[in-house]
Amino acid sequence: MAVNGYGTIGKRVADAVAKQPDLELVGVAKTRPSFDARRAVDLGYPLYLAADAVRSDFDAAGLQVAGTVKEMVARADVVVDATPDKVGAENRALYDAANVRAVFQGGEKASVADVSFNALGNYAAARGKRRVRVVSCNTTGISRAVAVLLPRWGVERWDVTLVRRAADPAESKKGPINGIVPSLHIPSHHGPDVRTIFPDLEISTVAVVVPTTLMHVHVNHVRLRSAPASAAELVAALRSTPRFRVFAPWEQANGTPQVMEFARGRGLGLDDVPENVVWEDGVSLEGRDAYFFQAIHQESVTVPENVDAIRAMFDLAPDGPASIARTDRALGLSRA
């Protein structure tokens, strides 16, 4: 497989694919020289010229180029498009012309692909598909949680308030500096996006943007069709599910700063937290009403989903749980 776009998501997907025993990385494409381009070369990833990239710019930077993005695509069975929002839709013609499959990101409209994807939610739906869209970081986080609660207790209604980070850490020109900015589109787009995974789910979402770069936080209120015996049963279900990291009270991970400090010491690379983060003390139950917080690391949460999407498209695993286990084992993820 190849990665077109080697930024926040692309570099992480390339790293993840390079660690998988059943996938091979053909190369990565960038539009201009940068420290990320240098990183790709240092890691031994063949570097290709994307879009309007100028070879002489890379030559001047001392970065060896393997060819053009068209040449990279021609050498691949599938391309993960990690280009900026809406650019992926423009690139679809390139992939169609080369007769290669493609995985798009959540910044594209659902219509760019045959199916929207979440490994816990609808792995089988992507089997054999040529165009798959991995949903956005927030939609991924919500969909994972739905995949835990819905089959166990049923869901009558799901309401989420998303407290969104203003920008990724490297985006120094973006986001509010001193303020809280409400998304005035009510409901926000996240609910309809979740329904591309769970079409019959009754869900409503609202969002506010706050001046942080660390993570998103979701405040969930779920009216279940039947009640768990206790909040502890709900915690146990989350804790036993892949791609959830439940912090116990004694761990003193009181908020996103502590979670990111945990990530720095964990050593997965790039300080990543690909799991949904849940605080045990932040889970409560009142009859059929479940409440819980979860934090979503926007830079990494969709990365394992891209790997699983590829396996589903090429039928490389017997089912979703098998692919998730293979991906997570290669990435060094563990349940806790």
Image (tube, rainbow, N blue to C red):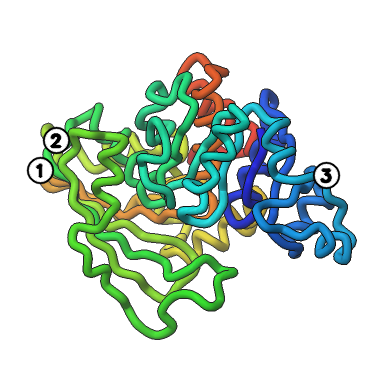
Q: Mark 3 vs mark 1: which is more N-terminal?
A: 3
Element on which disc 2 rests: loop
Element on which disc 1 rests: loop
Q: Position of residue 194 (x, y in %)?
A: 29, 43
Q: Mark 2 vs mark 3: which is more N-terminal?
A: 3
Seen in the picture, residue 113 relative to 302 is either above or below; the reply is above
Question: How many other residues sit within 10 Å of disc 3, few (<14), some (14-19) or many (≥20)?
Answer: some
Q: Nearer the viewer, residue 38 or 101?
A: 101
Could you tell me which residue is drawn at 65 percent across and 33 percent down? 330
Q: Position of residue 129 (x, y in %)?
A: 46, 24
Q: Nearer the viewer, residue 229 or 19?
A: 19
Name the amino acid type tagged 3.
Ala
Q: Mark 2 vs mark 1: which is more N-terminal?
A: 2
Q: Label 2: which residue?
A: 227
Q: Label 3: which residue?
A: 66
Q: Label 1: which residue?
A: 287
**How far, Cα to Cα, is label 2 from label 3?**
57 Å
Mark carried by residue 87: none
Taking the image as shown, residue 237 lies to the left or right of residue 47, namely left
Could you tell me which residue is drawn at 31 percent across and 55 percent down? 293
